[in-house]
Image (spheres, rainbow, N blue to C red):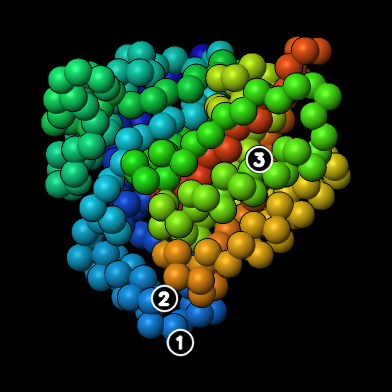
Amino acid sequence: MKHISYHKIIKSLKRELLKANVNLNHEVLEILKKYSSNEIVKFLVDNAEISLKSKLPLCQDTGIIEFFVELGNEVRLEKDITSILNKAVAQAYKEYYFRYSVVSDPLFERKNTFSNIPCIINLDHIPGDKLKIEFLVKGGGSENLTALKMFEPSASIDEIKEFIIEHIKLNGGKACPPLHIGIGIGGTAEKAAFLSKKALLKSFKMRNSNALYKNLEEELLKKLNELKIGFQGLGIGPTVLSVNIEYFPTHIATLPVAVSVNCYLCRKGVIEL
């Protein structure tokens, strides 16, 4: 058995949560610099530089944290993983003075928990002695663009493309574009939504290993950028940074398709122990 210290996990996660909220994603920064002569883009780059130097958040919405955990069956933890992850987030958001964005009751009282917890935790038990923790910092604007449609299994590829393109056409300007688009196909309704979030963990340059899905990613990227929503919805530069697809087997009578997006900040992180 491999023992991993509770305090080591907490320390590592706090460091990554700080980095995700104050260091602009390097892939995004590379793209921004290609348009640095534009006044709007210059403001975004200046904001990133100020955030990095001051350790202040890139955006006032420091999000809700969604974790994706792979826990090896040979790993021994001092406490349960849910307690550890929530503790790390609560400590990080208090120490770094990040905005608390979580309410305890989603419908009636909507009172702030003043800790930014509980987090959303997706746990996968795997063989071996490794612990991998990935996370997304999901702001409200990007999260509100999540969509799910249950297609008939006879639906065409063109119908699915039309659903995705129309959704971004109508809503893409509301989530601080250019956007990272995650698409989940298959499984059940909740599995498709999960897959669409997991797709957002990928690098922009990663393509699906299945050639059919790879081609679909590339076609959607091209067509979505033809919408010309652009930086912050002003029509300049790319609308979409990347399109990534995750898929899973499904029931013979179903075809769920989910779409998730990240705003241009694409805040995420990972630790492996």
- Is residue 8 or residue 157 the one in the foreground? 157
Give amino acid for label 1. Ser
Which residue carries the number 2 mark? 41
Q: Residue 194, percent across and down?
A: 55, 27
Measure the alpha-carbon separation of dots 3 and 2.
30 Å
Instruction: Kindly indicate whether the residue at mark 1 contacts the one at mark 3 (C-beta within 8 angstroms).
Output: no
Of the residues under marks 3 and 2, which one precedes in the sequence? 2
- Is residue 176 or residue 113 the one in the foreground? 176
Q: Residue 199, percent across and down?
A: 60, 39
Above or below, 157 against 214 in this view is: above
* Picture disc at residue 181: none
Instruction: Kindly indicate whether the residue at mark 2 contacts the one at mark 3 (C-beta within 8 angstroms).
Output: no
* Picture disc at residue 37: 1
**Quarter-wise, where is residue 39 in the image?**
bottom left
Measure the alpha-carbon separation of dots 3 and 1.
34 Å
Task: Identify which residue is drawn at 37% across, 46% down.
Answer: 141
Q: Secondary structure at mark 2?
A: helix
Dot 3 crowding, Cα within 10 Å, few <14, some 14–19, many 20+: some
Which residue carries the number 3 mark? 163
Q: Is residue 13 visible from the viewing direction of this image?
A: no
Task: Identify which residue is drawn at 56% across, 16% down.
Answer: 125
**Quarter-wise, where is residue 144 in the image?**
top left
Give amino acid for label 2. Val
Q: Nearer the viewer, mark 3 or mark 2?
A: 3
Give amino acid for label 3. Phe
Q: Is residue 6 left or right of residue 220?
A: left
Task: Identify which residue is drawn at 82% across, 34% down.
Answer: 156
Q: Secondary structure at mark 3?
A: helix
Of the residues under marks 3 and 1, which one precedes in the sequence? 1
